[in-house]
Image (spheres, grey):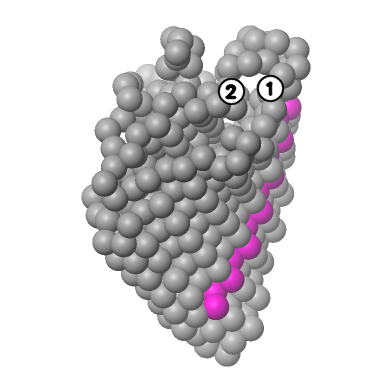
Amino acid sequence: MIDQIEKNLLKEIADLHSIPEGAYNIRKNGASEGRGQSANITIESKAEGKGIDIYVKPGTVNESVHIPVIISRTGYEEVVYNDFHIGENCDIVIIAGCGIHNTGSCASRHDGVHTFYVGKNSKVVYVEKHYGDGEGTGENIMNPKTVLYLEEGAHVEMNTTQIKGVDSTVRDTQAELKKGASLVVTEKIMTHGRQVAKTNFVVDLNGEGSSAHVVSRSVAKDSSHQEFNSLVNGNAKCAGHTECDAIIMDQGTVSAIPRINANNVNAALVHEAVIGKIAGEQLIKFMTLGLSEKEAEEQIISGFLK
């Protein structure tokens, strides 16, 4: 049974107000709270409850899968392995994410490993949100790892968001792309207090005509720290771009290390990083509209992370 606090977590991480239609799996404190299937998408539990396998039949289009995780037990820790087996010529949306409500003094932690096997010419939009709340002093810890294998002509759009309440996170993403495959990653992170967030991207462009566009936007407030590491390996005739764009406030710090390796004479690769504070003229522009300095900052940050 899901209580009101847990319903709020589902709303934050998956925009769910009720049980979704079609395929879904809701995981609560280490156990399945509900599961649905469709004619084209099936979900099977792994041994000992350590995760799930999601199977999408070839040719499946205009369907979605919801797989949110919620933790409301203080001190609960888990590692979950979810594998996505996506057939050829599919077009689907996968909505994941983790929400933790911690009211105690012990750390609550979720480490999720998601592996995608994306079939030839399939398109996947993957949305993942992380959120934490609760009045306790225990940390909310989330360490997501995503591994992607894209067959010829496959396309994945990966949108990840961490906006509130995650005290510590290490976010690892690894991808291998075959001929004509493409990957677009958009990451948004905001940290505050003494929170720490580390991001690692490694993308191997192995096939001719493959491409990757990796963008991270982040805001570090108070005394929080963020670290962005990315590596794009151009191993064929391909195109790759990696970018970090960060705002620092108060005593926040950000380290950005975008790297590119051109291992083929026809690899076209670009990297860039921009870190700085909110420009004074931006604040003045909003304050002339009647906003306080704090309200102006909030508006600028909201637009930056949108």
Residue at point 57%, 90% (across, down): 265
Q: Secondary structure at mark 2?
A: loop
Amino acid beneath label 1? Tyr
Q: Residue at x 63, y 16 (%)?
A: 73
Displayed quadrant of residue 4: top left
State the separation of the CA atoms marked 2 and 1. 7 Å
- Residue at the far front: name it: 47
Q: Quick one: label 2, few (<14), some, or many (20+) residues within 10 Å?
A: some
Quadrant position of residue 289: top left
Where is the N terminus found, in terms of image quarters?
Answer: top left
* Residue at the outermost bottom position: 265
State which tag comes first along the sequence, 2 or 1: 2
Q: Is residue 283 left or right of 276 when viewed as pictured?
A: left
User: Which quarter of the rendered picture does the C terminus lie within?
Assistant: top left
* Residue closest to the far right: 106
For mark 2, what is the residue? 29
> Front-most of 299 and 267?
267
Q: Position of residue 221 (x, y in %)?
A: 64, 30
Badges 2 and 1: C-beta atoms under 8 Å apart? Answer: yes
What residue sits right under mark 1 in the picture?
76
